[in-house]
Amino acid sequence: MNLKLLAGTHNENLSSDIALHLGVELTKRKIKHFMDGETYVKIEQNIRGDDVFIIQSLAKPVNESLMELLIFIDAVKRASAGRITVVIPYYAYARQDRKSEAREPITAKLVADIITKAGASRVLAVDLHVSQIQGFFEIPVDEVSAIPLFAKTVSEMNLSDLVVVSPDVGAVKRARILAKRLDCPIAIIDKRRTMHNDAEVMNIIGDVKGKNAIILDDIIDTGNSIVKAADAIRKQANKVLICATHPVFSGECHKKLMDSSAERIIVTNTLPVKFTEDKFVVVNIGRFLSEVIRNIHQDRSVSELFD
Ligand code: R5P
């Protein structure tokens, strides 16, 4: 099967970078919108029997990017592709992963169902909000992590006396993985969620006094959680750095981060990034994703790339 890369419109820079690293051209496609807002796509090359990777981040506006992905999958399926892997650098709706109150939906499962029903054969995603989402799919899922890239970036900053801080109890496993790579201890923030998109720091479990603290989170959306965490840690720590995979950055987030006591905010480009200030470090995940895609295409191990 030939490898074909198809880019949605919701992170074209990352798709072009992946194509560059793989040394393949992006497959030609046409996308337009009708007057009523309906999306139309057409694959403009033969992909019959090919190993097609559709790259689409579920970026804002989330429902638009999701719908475009579904229509792409359908077009590729009906064009008789051999296999369809959807590459979803940022999987939105992941935070609605269980019923925490009566009569709520489990939207992370619904999205998995519709992607599968549309015709995807497999999924490649980066740092899912919770890894259990892998099991929401009835097709194979490869979940890869930006943590090794964060570890490399932080190591190159030559900071001593590090501590990795988990912004809540649920994220401790991720913090441990980064701490192991940086050979340092962890601390945990005991956070209480007050409402959607807001949380209060109750306690800090562990020693951050005088240390260079790295708060590791998966998503920065409004910035409320991470800024409160950074400001609380900074009262005791020497420096505070933030690492987060997905820069959703809604509303006033950018300003909140600029005004926060964090010295550096390290994110990846799983979502389109526009900020240019020195306070932000953008780790390009394109090369890594290109290696993962190559290994999937060649039926080789993906986990061997993390070592
Ligand atoms: C929560 O469990 C997530 O890991 C993030 O901490 C949270 O969703 C970020 O949202 P916001 O930036 O709006 O506080």
Image (cartoon, rainbow, N blue to C red):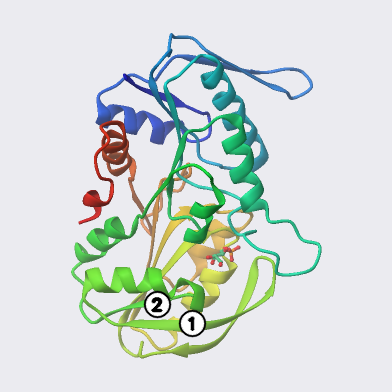
Q: Mark 2 belongs to which amino acid?
A: Val
> Which numbered tag is attached to residue 189?
1
Q: Is residue 11 left or right of residue 283?
A: right
Residue 217 at x, y percent in the picture: 45, 66
Q: x, y (%) of residue 122?
A: 45, 38
Does the image show residue 61?
A: no
The amino acid beneath tag 1 is: Ile
Q: Residue lying furthest front in this view?
A: 138
User: Vertically, is 279 above or below 25?
Assistant: below
In the rendered image, which residue does mark 2 sit on?
A: 165
Cβ of mark 1 under 8 A from ligand 1: no
Task: Check the picture and name the quadrant holding the N terminus.
Answer: top left
Residue at position x 28%, y 44% from top? Answer: 288
Residue 291 placement (x, y as % from top left): 26, 39
Alpha-carbon span between mark 2 and mark 1: 7 Å
In primary-sequence order, the first of circles 2 and 1 is: 2
**Image side of residue 77 versus residue 113, left or right:** left
Q: What element carries label 1?
A: strand
Depth check, front residue: 156 or 206 = 206
Query: Is the Cβ of the residue at disc 2 closer than 8 Å to that at disc 1?
Result: yes
